[in-house]
Image (tube, helix red, strand yellow):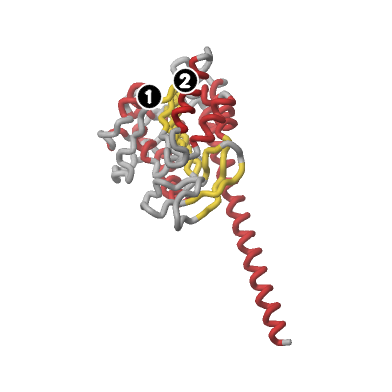
Amino acid sequence: MKTLLLLLVWLGLVICDNNSSLYDDNSTLHQLREVHKSQMKILSSLISLNLCDHMYFDLGTNLGVQIRKLYQPEGYPKAPILPFFDNFFGNDSHSRRHVCAVGFEPNNVHTERLKSLQQRYRNASFPCVIFTDTAIGTEDGTVDFYNDPSISIEWGASTIKWQKNTMTTTSLSVDANRFFHQTILHWKKTSSYTNDTKVIAKMDIEGGEFEVIPTMLAHGSLCLIDFMMLEWHHRFIPNAEEEIEKMLVFMTSHSKHCKFKLIDLDDETYAFDNNFPLPPETRKLLSATAQGRMSFLSKV
């Protein structure tokens, strides 16, 4: 009898522990979804307030170094991407404050750093929105995410399991096609979207590109982007990029309304960052209009 009671108590503890884990998981996902909703509202407000003359989408943000190169190019003088940014966005800090940077990073190892980075740039009047714990994909929902234990910055972390001894977490997933259509079409209704407006993207999503790129092409959202720097990850599907690139060239060249161009540029310099100082708050240096702009950014 005593053994049976002990067994029932043990089973009860196991069930309670499992229910607690399930509750914790659901609670975490609820929090992530609430953060995502808040970030979407902020991005929508940046667009509605005409704070985006151009947009840079950083798909696979990692430590946020590419966004740092955009907003603080002086700290990354050897980065190959700098002339590209200069050509389309101007080469001074004032013009870069009119480029909205939108990042996506599913790895929760980088979440706190990216949140801090985002806030520091907003405080300096740079319109930055980084969707942490969020992967760019082909549907809205959640996705299993596998970390990369082989390197401190988790360079090879992916939604595809390809390494041993990897830890699995759950991240949000955003339908790239829906997101780009919704965001760009909203932006086109504002006065800040002009014939000179540029939409630039970088995609480094560790194998996810083999699904995301064809889907975006098939549904037209890829044609909302002017230029994309894309890294193909051959270890997942060898030689597949050749066929996809042929399809890209054929479909975009036969469309009068598709402006998309693939850029052969994979800038992975300063991958570990270089501790270049983040910008200070700039309230005292700005005009009244700019102060109002910065006030909004620092509060969101």
- Position in image of residue 21 (x %, y %): 61, 62
Which of the two residues, 97 or 2, is positioned nearer the viewer here? Answer: 2
Q: Can see residue 53? A: no
Q: Quadrant of residue 139?
A: top right
The type of residue carrying mark 1 is: Phe
- Position in image of residue 193 (x %, y %): 50, 20
Residue located at (37% from left, 31% from top): 286
Residue located at (54% from left, 48% from top): 171
- Kindly give the residue lying farthest to the top in the view shown: 256
The type of residue carrying mark 2 is: Val
- Position in image of residue 114 (x %, y %): 43, 45
Q: Which residue is mark 1?
A: 89
Q: Quadrant of the N terminus?
A: bottom right
Q: Which residue is mark 2?
A: 249
Q: Is residue 80 above or below residue 172?
A: above
Q: Nearer the viewer, mark 1 or mark 2?
A: 2
Q: In the drawing, does residue 99 fall left or right of residue 76?
A: right
- Kindly give the residue lying farthest to the left in the view shown: 78
Q: Quadrant of residue 74?
A: top left
- Position in image of residue 243 (x %, y %): 48, 27
Circle 1 Cα neighbour tier, 10 Å, few/some/many (<14 / 14–19 / ≥20): many
Q: Is residue 141 above or below residue 179?
A: below
Q: Is residue 15 above or below residue 232?
A: below
| Helix, strand or loop at mark 2 | helix
Circle 2 Cα neighbour tier, 10 Å, few/some/many (<14 / 14–19 / ≥20): few
Q: In the drawing, does residue 155 fall left or right of residue 74?
A: right
Q: Earlier in the sequence, mark 1 or mark 2?
A: 1
Residue located at (41% from left, 43% from top): 62
Q: In the drawing, does residue 293 fall left or right of residue 66?
A: right
Query: Mark 1 and mark 2: span between their CA atoms?
Result: 26 Å
